[in-house]
Image (cartoon, grey):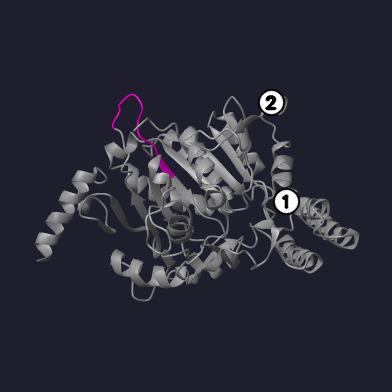
Amino acid sequence: MMSTMKHLFVVFLCVLGFFSTVTSINNSFRGTGNGSEAWGYIEVRPRAHMFWWLYWSPNRVDDPSKPWPTILWLQGGPGGSGVGFGNFGEIGPLDVNLKPRNSTWLQKADILFVDSPVGTGFSYVEDDNLFVKTDVEAATDLTTLLKTIYNISPSRQKSPLYIFAESYGGKFAVTVGLSVLQAVEKGELKLQLGGVALGDSWISPEDFVLSWGPLLKDVSRIDDVGLNNSNSLALKIQQQLADGEYEAATGSWSELEEVISDSSNDVDFYNFMLDEGNDPSTSKTKAWGRLGKQRYAKADDAADLDSVMNGPIRQKLKIIPANVTWGGQGGSVFSAMEGDFMRPRIAEVDELLLKGVNVTVYNGQIDLICATKGTEAWINKLKWDGLSAYLNLDRTPLYCGKDDTVTKGFVRSYKNFVFYWILGAGHFVPVDQPCVSLQMVGSIVNTPNA
């Protein structure tokens, strides 16, 4: 029986074009019989196991002149599960009720979800000393995973990889992008990097905390007392960052969040138009979303994501160790990275631009935690030689489909840098504005017409 199962799995992998043989890598892999999905563990360091899940787009077009793209999705936190929340909560083929999602990004690309860093989601470490402490360490682990996947798959090597990120995942994305380029230059990784896309990303913590008070005062969410208290703490954080006191700054950031909550009567950090927990579409879909803190994500009649991932999804995957619980080590991931949490990654964005990598930034209009005001502030700090020309260009309005009566956003681009302003969206842009988000993704990854 085991021999037959192994034979069928080899056939599946050959059809998928993902691996040449099962025995090429000493790791655990599974997949669906029709070749539409594959998943598994890769031991990126001894006793440090990273989980991945690849979906093959049903719209895939095989065109040698315009290769079909792959999206690598990186969740925030740190400690947020892309395999769980990004997949079932935002852009995967099924929602948390395991029903088809009409707005899945699989319409535009193959999608590779990874639970990174190790300890996130279904990923796990066998020793607490193996949690990563920096974005760069996380990037090294993820590059190891990509080497394992891409170096033995000629078909995958032809598919340009676009790294999409959300929230803290943006810091991972820029460090992974540079790590990938370095590995490619050294001949250690066979991969085409199509670009990096940063969605509501925590690139410059200083600029975001400085934006919170003024933004909330402008929209009448806090008063002058709240503004003064917020600004005082934000300036303290700014000084701690200037002094390199990153762990102390993380503590002050947490204190500032409490001040903001108290001054605003619990504003929702993901949508400043709402109160925390009062979103009418809120349900039991918990995720490590609020930069390390648990929160509830949108879904009208959603099942509890923890129950879904540790129930039917775990049963489907069949390779999750008995002692591993989805999200069980997520809090430890955040704690291990407290010393790097507030470190900016603007210089890494500059380096990607200098190397000619396509960089896209997109931001939800009503997000607070990674507010557009803060995003624009760190963009203005770029040393990129195209910045002045970019800032002087007009924006182009965006609409949903053929309806040109309602503005859904704006876009501005110059050379290899693009910025999208998505109206009516909070922190989770694909959830709040699925139509214009899908159009944006197709433009970024240059999807061939199906």
Q: Secondary structure at mark 2?
A: loop
Is 330 on the left or on the right of 215, as rendered? left
- The percent coordinates of residue 385 (x first, y second) are 67, 25
Q: Which residue is mark 2?
A: 394
- The percent coordinates of residue 327 (x first, y second) are 47, 69
Gap between marks 2 and 1 measured at Cα: 25 Å
Q: Which residues are magenta?
A: 62-71
Q: Residue at x 47, y 55 (%)?
A: 86
User: Who comes first in sequence, dot 2 or dot 1?
Assistant: 1
Q: Secondary structure at mark 1?
A: helix
Q: Residue at x 90, y 62 (%)?
A: 225
Tag count in the figure?
2
Is 65 part of what is drawn in magenta? yes
Is 272 on the left or on the right of 231, as rendered? left
Res 179 visible? no
Disc sitting over residue 312 in the figure: none
* Amino acid beneath label 2: Asp
Between circles 2 and 1, the one closer to the viewer is 2
- The percent coordinates of residue 119 (x first, y second) are 47, 65
Q: Which residue is mark 1?
A: 208
